[in-house]
Image (cartoon, rainbow, N blue to C red):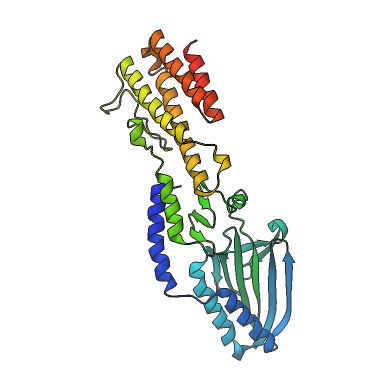
Amino acid sequence: MKSLKNVIAMIALVAIAMTAQAQKPVQEISQAFDEFYSKLYKAGYATSSSQDNYKEGYKKELYFALPMDKDKIVKEYDNQLFDYGRLAYSSLVKKAGTKNTSTLDIVYGEGNKQSHNFGSYSNRNYNVQLVRDRKDSTMRYAYALVWYKENDSIIGSMYKFYGKDPKKKTSRDVLRKGGWTIDKDGIVGPGVVIDDDGIQLAEGVKLEDVMKELKGLESLGVTSDDINNIDINDDDEEDKLSPDSNDSTKIKTSEDIIQRFNNLQVVYSKLNNKYKDYKKFSGADRLKMLNTRRLMIATNNQIRMLVNSGRYGNMLSSDDKGFIADQLKEMSNESKDKWLKKSLNDLSTSLLK
């Protein structure tokens, strides 16, 4: 997942695109579905229909047969469905007679335990479009049209599925109710999901408000620069504490270690003063506390690497270790996070052995 700063920049670009898109509204596919459904029924072309409702959605289908000279209404809906496909996150379009062997399974029903396959018959036309619900980013619609020519008739079926999006993790359902999170898959918050598929906003959620909240998360008062050029990113890059580094601040003596430790201690203290248990918060405040804790853990890890590794630990005298152990004990006592409290205390104890 991109950094928060990159995500904010991405949102700004998408905002421009969304504004442009809003100026060219596409007919709601649900309306197109209903109109086509109604035309078939009123003209007497519907041969059967059904609707299955379940706890988290439904499946609606209609089978039809109409004269060849009436194919215009089928092609009209086919074109509408294809046009709406540019907003779909997944689709399948196949013309009868092609050698394309692609198929698409639409899962539905309770727990998405049922499945309907599209694309298996080479003599049929398929147009399937999957679109996320703009009011609920964990749900999705699937629209499908299947038709083929037989003698002087057009035989076909149309479908509308609504249910849980199997691509969205169940753990994210809770997050829609007030919390925020950032993980490798994206950012999820109240009424918004930002991932590789783009930005999904619930009805009533304004893009500018989302940007405002995310920008606020950057203002934690501590950056990597505050940690005296020590890399605290998640990237697996060579750390800047390496004695082989060309960094002007590379460590050569025990005094350098003590100075670096003091810098890290100041940063940790600043973060700890800001930190409160993230579980007591929701929304942007929760994410801010989680990010503060992430920085605290990163700082703790840098302290461990600095004072307890073979790379630098051998430079410290017994007095040096005693001094650092005392400081770590104080940091542990003041820590507001249980895991960090224990980690700092364990490190203090290990230095005195």
On the image, the x and y values in percent for residue 223 come to 37, 38
> With respect to residue 241, does 200 lie above or below?
below
On the image, the x and y values in percent for residue 90 come to 54, 63
Report the side of 54 relative to 87 (left or right).
Answer: right
The count of marks equals: 0
- Tell me if I can see residue 151 in this picture: no
On the image, the x and y values in percent for residue 236 come to 42, 35
Camera-side residue of 197 and 70: 197
Residue depicted at x 48% and y 11%: 352
Residue farthest toward the top in the current orientation of the protein: 318
On the image, the x and y values in percent for residue 255 come to 31, 16
> With respect to residue 242, does 44 lie above or below?
below
Residue depicted at x 65% and y 72%: 159
The image quadrant of residue 265 is top left
Camera-side residue of 121 and 78: 78
Residue depicted at x 51% and y 15%: 349
> With respect to residue 193, does 327 lie above or below?
above
Report the side of 83 relative to 171 (left or right).
Answer: left
Report the side of 344 relative to 48 (left or right).
Answer: left
The image quadrant of residue 153 is bottom right
Camera-side residue of 175 and 307: 175
Residue depicted at x 64% and y 86%: 39
Report the side of 36 relative to 258 (left or right).
Answer: right
Camera-side residue of 334 and 168: 334
- Tell me if I can see residue 340 in this picture: yes
